[in-house]
Image: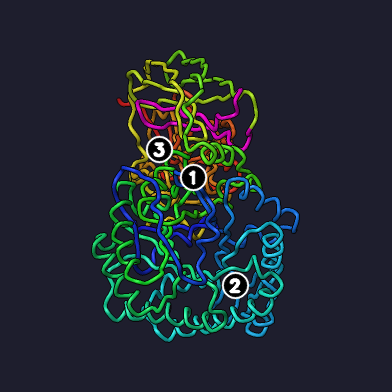
Amino acid sequence: MKKRFLALILLAFVLCGAVFAACTPSEDSSETESVPDTSEGDVSEIIKTEKDYPVLCGSFMQPGAFKNHSLSRMKEHLGYMLDVGIDILILQWSFVTEGDKVSSVFYESSFGADKKAASYDESGKMLLDTILAAAEEMGVKVFIGLNENPEWWNKYVTDKNWLTQQAELGLAGAKQIYDTYKSKYPNAFHGWYFVFEFSNMNATDAQLDNASYLLRTYRNGLYDIDPEMPLMLSPFVTASGPSPEKTGEMWEKVFAKAEFRPGDIFCCQDSVGAGHITMDMLDDFYREIKEAVDTVEGFKFWANNEDFTHTDWTTAPLNRFVEQMNISSKYVEAHVTFAYSHYQNPDMGKTGQHQAYKTYYETGKIPASTMAAPEIEVESAANGATVHISGSIANEDGTVAGIRITKDGSLAHSFDFSSNYGKKEFTFVFDDANVSGSGVAEYAVYAVDYYGNESPKATAEVEFTGKEGVNVALNKEYTLANPPADKYPDEQGDALTDGILGKPTYGDAAWLGFLAKAEVVIDLGEITGQLYAVEVNSLGGGGAGIYAAAAVTVYVSEDGVNFTKVASKSFAADNGVDELYTFTRTAFLPDGTKARYVKVEVTPLKSWMFIDEISVYAAKE
């Protein structure tokens, strides 16, 4: 089966690869070193923190999620960020291009209307004015991104004519944005953001020259509009690209021809949240990139520390995020994030995450856990085939964010309570099933808080005395009455019975994605007796809008035409978690069930349902 790259949500495509840049490794941390600067047009005067530990001064914002914000709501949003010292906002892009046309705008744009694509969208045209009006009143500095174009992820820096076309569009848009808004909001409108994201990949000298050309064209064009306004770019790094040393050398070559001005900012994505590198790589990449940045007079080096988790695009535990800032702080002058606006702001339902960061911002410390172990009750069915775990946990200080349940050391289920910040007690119910074999399973139940701490564990051992069975559906042919969504197809027609289980991320090619009921008819090849269970392996948790299956209904037939319903099982609602997990949905069949054809209907809870395997168990003879 070919690997698929999935894009369920708005944020996904911004975190994929492009052309070179970067960051990497060491686990010690230190305070940010002070770097004197006397250049004109820089932003050093707006980094006001006097903390002796790293904190954020800025956040990215993607326009789609905010295009309908009123002025009062935007002020509320910025107010939360000012509450924790964040007074810089980077609007990631202000319009989207499609070839030589404009497909959408987030400012009032006659330029866009004159060059509009067939699918032109101006529904968010008031966003930039709303942001700048709120920022001007509240003392926030705004960097405005110009044109985003999804074609970048295929073009990179291979087509100079395309790069020229995009630069011309970007600069034309910049001129209109400047003429419309600079005099109206002179303090808030502070700088520009270069939208196209480079990464560290193996590039030819010609491609490096194209990269320098693109940066130089934007830099000189923006300088002509206003020589005092700085330009920020935010490339990322990946372990699949060149080494940290080669990455630094690559950027030196690009910088030598890009013609950056004093006060411009290289704001490197640390790539930990996106999963492009691991934490132990971060120090090496930042060290080498700093050396490259230092070859350009007056060039600033900032960190873009990622505050999300790439497996499901949820907020990272605060202790992980602080470690990212600590490692990068040895080399950079300031820290921004992708993206407080999306992952830590109460305006977006992230009150607990905001309060946790605020505690760190005010104290420089990650508090120790105050959580007790959850209280649980464990019941096992007489035949050992099912286990029922129910429990509760007190939340007097409001720090509990969720519950984790492991089975034999692996995550079996997770409950996310982060959207219920302030609730004093949480309860939970978990049902597990054993379809084959006997033995002892060890369960552990513990709470997690917004800081990333874990509570003490409540544990239980359960003896399974299930039937000795075999999956008779393995590698068998099947038909789908309603196929999965086009983005997540069954490419080889064997994904549901090939025995390959997906990892707990929707990017794994083993998963098929459904937006409606899945109906699968499996041909066992011959009439088989003593069928006793059907098991559906599902991806759950609510991350990226994916929820575990809500119900499984089973029908059997000996001729493939006449089917009899033999089992139907509904499951407790998957209320969402802060990380995706794999979980089986099991329906037990009546004694004596036999069939050649087994029809399985799997009903989604809501939104997306992902399935990677359907197993049919028969007792061993």
Residue 329 to residue 289: above or below: above
The answer to whether residue 312 shows anywhere in this view is no
Q: Residues within 10 Å of mark 2 (few under 14, many from 20)?
A: many
Q: Amino acid at mark 1?
A: Lys
Q: Amino acid at mark 2?
A: Phe
Q: Earlier in the sequence, mark 2 or mark 3?
A: 2
In front: mark 1 or mark 2?
1
Q: Image point 49% across, 35% down: which residue?
A: 451
Q: CA distance from mark 1 to mark 2?
A: 36 Å
In front: mark 1 or mark 3?
1
Q: Which residues are magenta?
A: 396-421
Instruction: Give the structural element (helix, strand or loop) at label 2.
Output: strand
Nearest to the observer: residue 261 or residue 567: 261
Q: Is residue 304 magenta?
A: no
Residue at numbered disc 2: 95
Q: Residues within 10 Å of mark 3 (few under 14, many from 20)?
A: many
Instruction: Tell me the quadrant of the picture where the C terminus can be found.
Output: top left
Residue 370 to residue 328: above or below: above
Q: Image point 60% across, 28% down: which residue?
A: 398
Asked if the residue under mark 3 is in contact with the one under mark 1, i.e. CB atoms within 8 Å, the reply is no
Asked if the residue under mark 3 is in contact with the one under mark 2, i.e. CB atoms within 8 Å, the reply is no
